[in-house]
Image: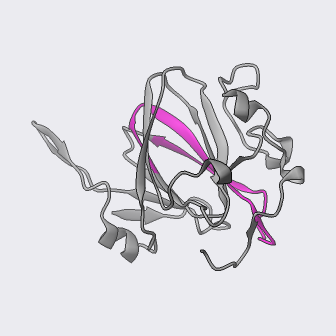
């Protein structure tokens, strides 16, 4: 596995590129190896796998996170199609608070993104019929499920869709802006 830091200002976000071995029959890849991730600085124990399908190009999911003690780190990959994946730093006191990392993930690129606790996560589909698989470090908890408005101008995210083009859930249309977000996470806080 190769580990890349897409934005040196936010080194907690890692792009992981598993090796892919192919021949005339197809390919083989170890997409998750705890030993390799730990060696690459990702020592998180994942407890749940999620699988999301989006039929339409321009589907926006996010920006989502869970609050402590149910906060989640995520390891996200695409097995069909392509997405722009976004992580926003929402750790109060962080020098990169409100800043984001945006990475194109695709089945073709075979890359993944690691998003630690303290970041809001979202994506937009760049193709139709997209399938996203992601591991999380904590079980889903409706009581701790929160969000941030995906197109808040304060975030300056270069979404490739306008508000009129984006296909959103009702919940994601009314999430709070960054200025109204409570301080759920604190920079340098010890993870629970």
Residue at (73, 43) in percent of width and height = 157
For residue 110, side relative to residue 44 (left or right): left
Question: Residue 28 location in percent, x, y?
Answer: 19, 48
For residue 4, side relative to residue 141 (left or right): left
Q: In the figure, 11 relative to 15: above or below?
A: below
Quarter holding the C terminus is: bottom right
The quadrant where residue 85 appears: top right
Q: Residue furthest front?
A: 143
Residue 63 colored magenta? no
Q: Nearer the viewer, residue 183 or 92?
A: 183
Magenta stretch: give its range: 76-105
Question: Residue 181 location in percent, x, y?
Answer: 83, 54
For residue 149, side relative to residue 78 (left or right): right
Q: In the figure, 124 relative to 85: above or below?
A: above
Q: Residue furthest left?
A: 25
* Main secondary structure found in the magenta portion: strand
Q: Nearer the viewer, residue 28 or 145?
A: 145
Residue at (80, 34) in percent of width and height = 174
Residue 81 colored magenta? yes
Q: In the figure, 118 relative to 51: above or below?
A: below
Question: Residue 4 location in percent, x, y?
Answer: 48, 63
Residue at (65, 47) in percent of width and height = 64
């Amino acid at each position: 596995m190769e580990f890349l830091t897409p934005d040196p200002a936010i080194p907690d976000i890692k792009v992981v590129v598993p090796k892919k071995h192919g021949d005339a029959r197809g390919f083989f890849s170890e997409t998750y190896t705890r030993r390799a991730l730990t060696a690459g600085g990702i020592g998180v124990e994942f407890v749940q796998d999620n699988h999301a399908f989006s039929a339409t190009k321009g589907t926006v999911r996010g920006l989502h996170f869970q609050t402590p003690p149910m906060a989640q780190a995520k390891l996200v990959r695409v097995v069909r199609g392509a997405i722009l994946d976004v992580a926003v730093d929402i750790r109060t006191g962080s020098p990169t608070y409100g800043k984001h990392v945006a990475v194109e993930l695709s089945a073709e690129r075979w890359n993944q993104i690691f998003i630690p606790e303290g970041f809001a996560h979202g994506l937009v589909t760049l193709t139709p019929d997209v399938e996203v698989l992601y591991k999380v470090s904590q079980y889903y908890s409706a009581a701790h499920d929160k969000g941030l408005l995906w197109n808040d101008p304060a975030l300056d995210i270069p979404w490739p869709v306008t508000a009129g083009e984006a296909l959103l859930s009702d919940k994601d249309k009314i999430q709070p802006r960054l200025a109204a977000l409570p301080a759920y996470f604190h920079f340098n806080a010890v993870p629970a």
